[in-house]
Image: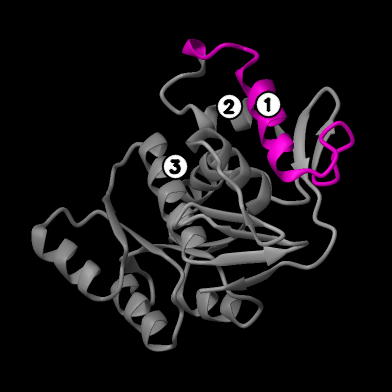
Amino acid sequence: MSILILEDDIALCKGIELTLNAPGREFTSCHTIAAANEALQKGTPELFLLDINLPDGSGLDFCEALRSAGYVAPVLMLTANDTELDTVIGLTNGADDYMTKPFSLAVLRARVDALLRRGTYDKIATADGFVFDFGALRFEKNGQPLELSKTEARLLQLLFTNRGQTLTREQLSEQIWPDGTEYVDENALSVAIRRLRAKVEDEPSNPRFIKTVHGIGYKWTQAHPVQESL
């Protein structure tokens, strides 16, 4: 999961990276449009965070150029311009969301997580006999539908989209029950894992996909390459 940050405030860049850090995420921080264009030659980000007022131009123009060039990843604009017109211009130029400085880093993380989930929902993943359509909440195994609860679907999404990465029990619990894990039974995650394994694994007691990383958490181990389509 690659995130490009275009922001000329170096300290703010570092704060954003620390706030958004999570397993499987990689950050490219650029302080000029020229540097951002150079970074695009090395890979396609899955999310853009763009400041508006930059030393060599406008983040609004850069956003418009991204859309014109065919980049479809979500764009979140960051700006000190607190006017309705600036917001309208940003959204018209192709931005998906808009935050005015100063902003809460906790709110920023929530907005980014929502944008990344939206991007994940746009794709249907197939591999090893599975079809996962997180947008429509449609899941299949070997051509047969999988009936998952909302908790199981969210758990599957977290594990699958971060496949190969170990997610701690704390990370999973905080994402599945964002309103507060202090109100959730400490065995709830173990129960959810057991129920999900019973539905996706051929041998739940000897799981092939949902692996336990003892003392840490869980990860999804993919046997074959994943194909994604819109």
Residue marked by disc 2: 173
> Secondary structure under badge 1?
helix
Badge 3: how crowded within 10 Å, few (<14), some, or many (20+)? some
Q: Residue furthest bottom?
A: 69
Q: Earlier in the sequence, mark 2 or mark 3?
A: 3
Q: Earlier in the sequence, mark 3 or mark 1?
A: 3
Q: Are marks 2 and 3 in contact (CB under 8 Å)?
A: no
Residue marked by disc 3: 109
Q: Amino acid at mark 1?
A: Arg
Query: Disc 3 and disc 1: Cα gap in Å?
Result: 19 Å
Q: Is residue 99 magenta?
A: no
Q: Quadrant of residue 203?
A: top right
* Residue nearest the observer in this picture, 90 or 122: 122
Extent of the magenta region = 182-209
> Secondary structure under badge 3?
helix
Relative vertical location of residue 162 with respect to residue 172 in this rendering, above or below: below
In percent of width and height, residue 31 lies at 48, 65
Residue marked by disc 1: 169
Relative vertical location of residue 170 with respect to residue 100 in this rendering, above or below: above
In percent of width and height, residue 54 lies at 36, 68
